[in-house]
Image (spheres, helix red, strand yellow):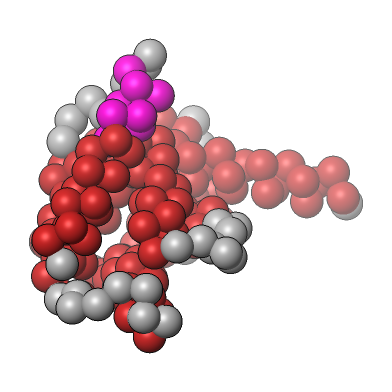
Amino acid sequence: MKTATIESIDKKAFILDISEKLFARYGARETTVRLITQKAGISIAMLNYYFGSKENLFLTVLERRIQQFKMAKNTVNMENKGTIEMLLTYMSVYIDLVVDYQPFYRLMMIEKLLNENKKAVEMIESYFQSNIQTLKNIIIQSVADEKIDGVNIETFVMNISGFLAYLILQTDLNEGSLKEENKKNLKKHIMKVLLASFFEM
């Protein structure tokens, strides 16, 4: 029984992996059940057994990856750090995730803009809003502790969000040997943006 359960979990994860790649490449609307079953080498009956429908499969794909992203960010240690260091630490993790999973981030942004699946959009918006709120909380706490002063929080967050949106919609960020170099260059750039922002403040 235990072996059968493990096989079932592995099969489900395999289907999710294949589906995520297809959704990221073609979008939720253009990715058909037939295409998923062909690429995964399974029957439509098996797909329905595990997920019930393409919509449920898509939502499960989103939920699985978003939970992984949240866990990665929750492990970040922000104790005994100054404002700039906290922001750089948080943004460093975010950049790692964006570069490593750029096709998925692009999928989320496109699905949000298309606004065709209410549940998916709510899930995506909740995730992005939680990231924005984390940035705001760091600034708000720093103002409260009198570490910085005269900060326009909304403008600051808008600048960072714009940079991240541009980053996500770029192409070829995570290809081959350039991946780590891209991460390094992007982290240098975000450091300059943050320092410039605080210098202006």
Task: Judge left or right: residue 51 versus residue 176.
Answer: right
Residue 175, located in which quarter of the rendered image?
top left
Residue 164 in sight here: no
Foreground residue among 190 and 3:
190
Point 38% across, 14% down: residue: 177
Q: Give, as a single range, the part of the protein colored magenta.
A: 178-186
Residue closest to the far top: 177
Figure check: 175 above or below 20: above
Task: Judge left or right: residue 200 versus residue 49.
Answer: left
Foreground residue among 147 and 137:
147
Magenta-highlighted stretch: main secondary structure?
helix
Point 15% across, 67% down: residue: 201
> Measured from the top left, where is residue 104 in percent x and y?
33, 45
> Measured from the top left, where is residue 153 in percent x and y?
20, 75
> Measured from the top left, where is residue 164 in percent x and y?
22, 50
Point 55% across, 57% down: residue: 76
